[in-house]
Image: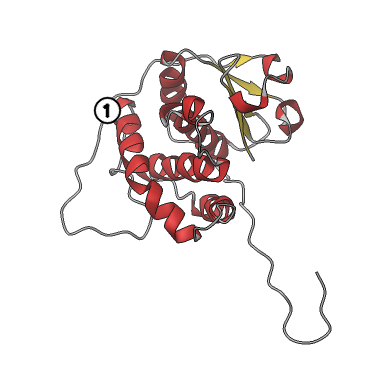
Amino acid sequence: MSQTTGDPVPELSRPRLLEGEAPSGLWEGLSALIQQRGFTVGRVADARAIGGANGLTDFTNRTVAVRADMDELQQVKTLSHELAHIDLGHEDRMDAAGWHRGIGEVEAESVALMIGAAHGIDTTTYTIPYVSGWAGTVKDKTPAEVVQATGERVRKTAGAILDGLPTVQTGIGDPPGLTRDAPVTRRTRERPPAVAAESFDAVRREPAREHVVRSL
């Protein structure tokens, strides 16, 4: 977009991939939960293998794929997002009347933010632009209204996932900057046994669109 007078039109910020190492045992713990739901977890070489996305949940073939060419921290954030798609019931909800992908993406990324926060990970440089962008696609609602409407479902889903993770957790998933009057109980658990992540090409087969969610 160009204009001849006035200030330049500001560009919307874009999600920035997280950099760094993942907390000990988090990939393994998330993978184990996904496998318990009947899905295979694997890494693919790059975004081209999954349609340009960072991660993909294929409800038809029961696979979850994450790009291997990202730092560990981004990989576990993306894996959290894909687990959230499963636990939020998006497989069934995406076939229901009134489904909007923007709402589903806001929910899944908000759960990923809470899982990261509980492990000392600040995902806001990725999550805030991602959530803002998808929330802005929902007709007749402001982004703030979309986030507020999804809040309770997000909290319940994130809490259940955190309860199922045998990882060392530093809080209950409150986003950075949020303070509470009541004290927060630290979650401390032993590291789970390692779960091998498979290398597979199943996600290259394009199943029916309504049963695949890609996390860009």
Would residue 154 appear left or right of 70 to someone viewing this image? left
Q: Position of residue 95 (x, y in %)?
A: 53, 28
Would residue 44 appear left or right of 159 to someone viewing this image? right
Residue furthest to the front in view is 97
Given residues 111 and 27, the one toward you in this image is 111
Q: Position of residue 170 (x, y in %)?
A: 30, 42
**Which residue is at a point 35% across and 23% down the rendered structure image?**
191
Up the image or down, 115 lies above or below 128; here it is above
For the residue labelled by badge 1, is the local secondary structure a helix, a strand or a loop? loop
| Quarter residue 156 falls in | top left
Residue furthest to the left in view is 182
Q: Quadrant of the C terminus?
A: top right
Q: How is the image coloured?
A: secondary structure
How many C-alpha atoms fall within 10 Å of the one at disc 1: few (<14), some, or many (≥20)?
A: few
Residue type, numbered disc 1:
Arg
- Residue 65 visible here: no
Which residue, given by chain and number where applicable, does mark 1 sit on?
189
Q: Position of residue 185 (x, y in %)?
A: 19, 43
**Which residue is at a point 59% across and 52% down the rendered structure image?**
137
Given residues 197 and 79, the one toward you in this image is 79
Would residue 80 appear left or right of 180 to someone viewing this image? right
- Residue 5 visible here: yes
Given residues 22 and 157, the one toward you in this image is 157
Up the image or down, 134 lies above or below 105; here it is below
Residue furthest to the bottom in view is 5
Q: Position of residue 180 (x, y in %)?
A: 22, 58
**Which residue is at a point 73% across and 35% down the rendered structure image?**
52
